[in-house]
Amino acid sequence: MNKRGLWVVLGLFGGLFFLLFALLAVTASAVKGDDYAASSGAGIGVIEITGEISDSKKELRWIRGFSEEASIKAILVRIDSPGGSVGPSQEIYSELKRLNETKPVVASMGSVAASGGYYIALGARKIFANPGTLTGSIGVIMQTMDASKLIPLTKLDWQTYKSGELKDMGSPLRAPNDKDKEVFAELIKSVYEQFLGAVVTSRGLDEKDVRPLADGRVMTGQQAADKKLIDAIGTFQTAVDEAAALGNIKAKSPQLVYPPETDGEGMFLRFIREASKSAVREAVKTLISNASYGGVQL
């Protein structure tokens, strides 16, 4: 391909890309704010939190989307999680608690809502669980591995260079010392007190009543209800009815609105995005297959 032909190809694909990106911008503007809207009348936004909690970006976007949509009058958080990372659990809890100031938030526990899963539920105005739901587990855990005794067997000479005494604390390459254990204990205590404080504040309980239960034990939904760690025994439908009542939704069967699978991206927008990716692949393939430089074929 000569230079003129190459420029023609680049011009054609450049025009195609401009058209696709223009459509992308128009479509994004058109679908913004509509993905979370109830098709008719008032609705309940449903956020499902399942599995291990390791990140919160997706849930925070969902919460923000529902908070900004006028047709969503209440939020229902369905939790099926054994817990996970501290930071993401705290972020979701905090955002739900803040949203609860303007729109009622109700939590429904499935098979398990323990540790971080229970932490998140504390952001709701009302918490429901099944009698056999596994919940509680109010506590913090951190585990490290000491593989220092295996190092001689590898016949490798491991070296660690660090800026401070504790920079490699928790490393499997050496046994923990007393200073390591002290710092880890302080860290665990700090996070634990934050968790305990959230339970006391959100549930309106005395710390002296909660602390004996906050030893990491798992309990059933019925036990949690007896200890006032949740509001009542109830199914998902019970939570729906409560959310409708708190949101002043009069419909006999409130509309449940779930976040779009594409997380705010309309179907046509997704089509444009996929088409753009396909066009890029074809453009690169064409240019590579036809270009020649100094007789070297690519």
Image (tube, helix red, strand yellow):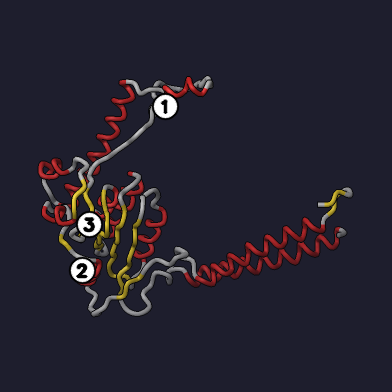
Is residue 82 visible from the viewing direction of this image? yes
Q: Nearer the viewer, residue 19 or 35?
A: 35
Is residue 125 rendered to the left or right of residue 89? left
Q: Marks 1 and 3, how far apart in space?
A: 37 Å
Question: Which of disc 3 and disc 1 is earlier in sequence?
Answer: 3
The disc at residue 209 is: none
Between circles 2 and 1, the one closer to the viewer is 1
Q: Marks 2 and 1, how far apart in space?
A: 50 Å
- Residue bearing the label numbered 3: 133
In the figure, 29 relative to 95: above or below? below
Q: Residue at x 27, y 60 (%)?
A: 110
User: Judging from the image, what secondary structure is the residue with disc 2 in?
Assistant: helix
Q: Mark 1 Cα within 10 Å, few/some/many (few <14, many 20+)?
A: few
Q: Residue at x 32, y 67 (%)?
A: 45
Q: Quadrant of the N terminus?
A: bottom right
Which residue reaches farthest front? 153
Q: Residue at x 71, y 67 (%)?
A: 15
Q: Position of residue 280 (x, y in %)?
A: 67, 61
In the figure, 38 relative to 126: above or below? below
The disc at residue 238 is: 2
Q: Position of residue 187 (x, y in %)?
A: 30, 33
- Residue bearing the label numbered 1: 147
